[in-house]
Structure formats: structure tokens, C-alpha cells
Amino acid sequence: MLHTFWVGNLCLVLDAHLSAGKQHTSGHGKAALARLLDELGERGPALVRGDCGYGNEDIIDVCEQRER
């Protein structure tokens, strides 16, 4: 499964994480999202958007922990 993190309006891919086919939920992309947000630091996005699978407490916590 490929989890991609990109800037929507620019169609610019920031990172991609490849995992086993059965690892398709947001829980398997959470660590990659956290690493990306840490790497971007102050240059990170003001808004993180994801599909319905990313609208859960674990992903929200990842984003809130890095609030600027």
C-alpha cells in the first residue's frame, strides 16, 4: 500500500511510504506522517487534510502535538 503526503493545489508529493498490501489504514501511515511533520518543522502545513480514514483521534493527536 502506498501512503502519499502531498500539497493538494500544487500536486507536489512531499513523501511516500510503501507498506504491505494489508497495511492500508491510517494507523499504518501515522508514523510516516509524524516523521514528515517533524522534518518540515516550521515549514510544515498550517492545515493537514486526509480522507475519511485519517479523521480519527490518533491522527488528530499527531497533528495537534506539532501545532505551531
Image (cartoon, helix red, strand yellow):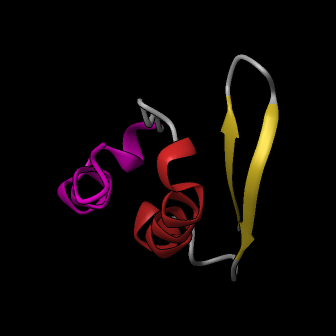
Q: Residue at x 24, y 63 (%)?
A: 58
Q: Which residues are magenta?
A: 51-68
- Location of the C terminus by quadrant is top left
Q: Is residue 39 left or right of residue 54?
A: right
**Residue 19 location, x and y as percent?**
69, 79
Residue at 32% across, 51% down: 63
Q: Quadrant of the rendered structure where residue 15 is?
A: bottom right
Residue 20 falls in which quadrant of the image? bottom right
Q: What percent of the width, then of the height, locates residue 44?
A: 53, 44
- Left or right: 22 with respect to 31? right
Position of 47 relative to 39 (above/below)? above
Q: Is residue 28 magenta?
A: no
Whether residue 56 is in magenta: the answer is: yes
> Which residue is depicted at the point 69% across and 76% down?
21
Q: Quadrant of residue 43?
A: top right
Q: Position of residue 5 (x, y in %)?
A: 65, 48
Residue 36: % across, % down = 58, 62
